[in-house]
Image: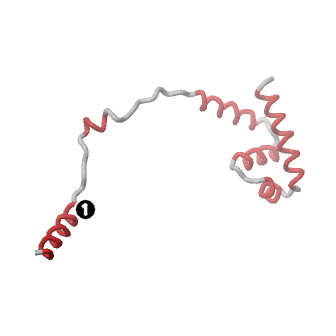
Amino acid sequence: MYRVGLNTAITLYRKSKRSIKTQDYDSVMFRISSEEYDDTVEQQLKLMYSAVKELNDIDKALVFLYLEDKNYKEISETLGITEVNARVKMNRVKTKLKKILNP
């Protein structure tokens, strides 16, 4: 008797795993929240990239590596400068970008 109950339970479990569970479209539609489009972040990125375009090639490379979350050791190895020089250049580039963005 125990074995029959166990086999029946195993069979039902296997059948339930094979079936694909679906949801009604109307019930899912109400859970989707619509957000208003806000383009302030996009505008800020455009301003940032236009300011970076005004920099020289080494400064551009420095900024892009910094934005990719590379540490100063990796940046210095990539650009062929010392780590201290990379930090100093990054601070100078930041001040240049501030002047360009806030004249």
Q: Is residue 79 above or below residue 40?
A: below
Q: Amino acid at mark 1?
A: Lys
> In the image, what residue occupies the spot 21% across and 60% down?
16
Residue placed furthest toward the left? 1
- Using residue 43 as the reference point, say whether residue 93 is left or right of it: right
Q: How many marks?
A: 1
| Quadrant that contains the C terminus | top right
Q: In the rendering, at what x and y percent does residue 13 appear?
A: 21, 64
Q: Determine whether, in the image, residue 26 is placed left or right of residue 46.
A: left
From the top left corner, tell me how far across and down residue 34 is, in percent: 41, 30
Q: Which image quarter: residue 76?
A: bottom right
Pick the front one: 56 or 6? 6
**Based on the displayed image, in which of its 4 quarters is residue 78 positioned?**
bottom right
Residue at left offset 80%, top offset 38%: 55
On-image quarter of the N terminus = bottom left
Relative to 3, is 33 on the left or the right? right
- In the image, residue 63 sits, relative to residue 50, either above or below, namely below
- Residue drawn at the location 80% of the way across and 31% of the way down: 98
Across and down, in percent, residue 25 comes to: 25, 39
The local secondary structure at tag 1 comes to helix
> Looking at the image, which residue sits at the far top?
103
Q: Residue furthest front?
A: 2
* Residue with the mark numbered 1: 17
9 w.r.t. 89: above or below: below
Asked if residue 93 lies left or right of residue 16, the reply is: right
- Residue at (70%, 45%) from the top-left corner? 67
Residue 79 lies, in percent from the top left, at 82, 55
